[in-house]
Image (cartoon, rainbow, N blue to C red):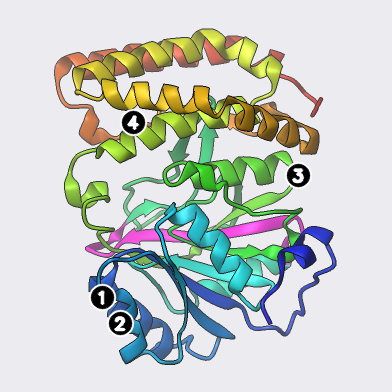
Amino acid sequence: MPMTDSMHESGAATRNPAEKPSLCIINYNGEEFLKDVISSVLEGDDSDYYGEVVLVDNGSTDASVAIVTRHFPSVRIVKLEENHGPAAARNAALRNASSGRVAMIDNDVIPAPGCFRLLNEALDRDPAAVLAMPRILYATSPDTIQYDGAHCHFLGLMALHNERRALAGAPTETRAIGAVVTACYMIDRTRWPCGNPFDESFFIYLEDLETGIRARAQGHRVLSVPAAHALHREGTKGLSLRRTGVHTKRRVFCTIRNRWQILLIHYQAATLMLLAPALLLFEAFQFAGAIAKGWLGEWLRAAGWMIAHAGEVFAKRRAAQNARRVPDRDILASGPVPFTPELAAGAITRAGLAVLNGATNFWWALVVRLLPKGAR
């Protein structure tokens, strides 16, 4: 029987250690991937590990549902009538899954044998952990790490760990991280404090960073388990950067808007004041880049959305700050500004990025010791 929201929010649900985890596949127009992905799950070495396999279809317009219905009748299908983004689909998966511990993959991810067993064991060993993710490898180049964790850069962006690093020689110890990257992960719902783990207003992009920040701020842990592997294919047509080679207008709009939401909802007031010069410099750089690349309309649309939804954003801020147990000082981190290499073409752009990196990290070094040490 699926765990209900009331059970979840009341804290009454507890996990049976013998219970098999649910595996949920998040799908949007993934007909080209689904046979390989589901076959690897149902016919692989871990085929008896899952209590159920659920496909959550996010309003696909291709033949995804028909393919799964025809070829994989044992897979339970939860069909959403409209595409409200992966955040909404993940929340729907958790509402419909039967187990307290849920493994989740995107429709272009193939977990390696033992992947979720290792994540499950890591969660068992750490009672404070709510989320665990494996090391993600490129399916077309499985000797190269795509990423194996992330943290929140102090500018409000997701910084990936071990991005594009050779697999050989990379460390394999389980470690605490700042954010989960949701191509493949496991969540223990019985440990999640309340409500939906994913903010559906984000639609897509940085929604997983927001989840990680919220978990960390409330005193929970997020784990990277590099000994567990998963292969990541090309992503959704017309959406994935690996396929389009360019940032779509939706990606630009959502990334700008969602970063602003993260700052306004989750950063403590003192943090925002102390980091204001660095944040304003980044905004100036982002605004100039939007003009140069023809994205001014997306920047303005993001600003308009924030104004129109200001009441909702500040209501979320009050809730997030009231639930906070860990200060920003223990959540945010420095480092190079996370920047897609494909956007760094041209000498002027690279020079500007170098200035941005130097100036913002210099400011962070000046103020980091002044950041709040407590949750209030």
| Res. 219 mark | 3
Give percent across and percent down for residue 331.
64, 34
Residue count near mark 3 (Cα–Cα under 10 Å), binned few <14, some 14–19, many ≥20: some
Q: Are marks 1 and 2 in contact (CB under 8 Å)?
A: yes
User: Sequence-wise, which precedes: disc 1 or disc 3?
Assistant: 1
Q: Is residue 129 magenta?
A: yes
In this rendering, is residue 208 above or below 266? below
Q: Is residue 332 above or below residue 90?
A: above
Mark 1 or 4, which is nearer the eye?
A: 1
Q: Is residue 331 left or right of residue 112?
A: right
Q: CA distance from mark 1 to mark 4?
A: 35 Å
- The answer to whether 34 appears left or right of 76 in the picture is left
Residue 66: mark: 2
- Quick one: label 4, few (<14), some, or many (20+) residues within 10 Å? few
Q: Which residue is mark 4?
A: 339
Give the Cα separation between the discs numbered 1 and 3: 42 Å
The three-letter code of the residue at mark 4 reads Phe
Amino acid tagged 1:
Ala
- Is residue 134 highlighted in magenta? yes
Q: Gap between marks 4 and 2, in whole Å?
A: 39 Å
Q: Secondary structure at mark 2?
A: helix
105 shown above or below 240: below
Q: Earlier in the sequence, mark 4 or mark 3?
A: 3
Q: Are marks 3 and 2 in contact (CB under 8 Å)?
A: no
Which amino acid type is marked by label 2?
Ala
Disc 1 designates what residue? 63
Q: Which is more N-terminal, label 4 or label 1?
A: 1
Where is residue 201? Give x, y as percent.
Answer: 52, 42
Q: Earlier in the sequence, mark 3 or mark 2?
A: 2
Stretch of the chain drawn in magenta: 125-144
Nearer-N-terminus badge (4/2) = 2
Residue drawn at (72%, 57%), measured in percent from left and top?
Answer: 192
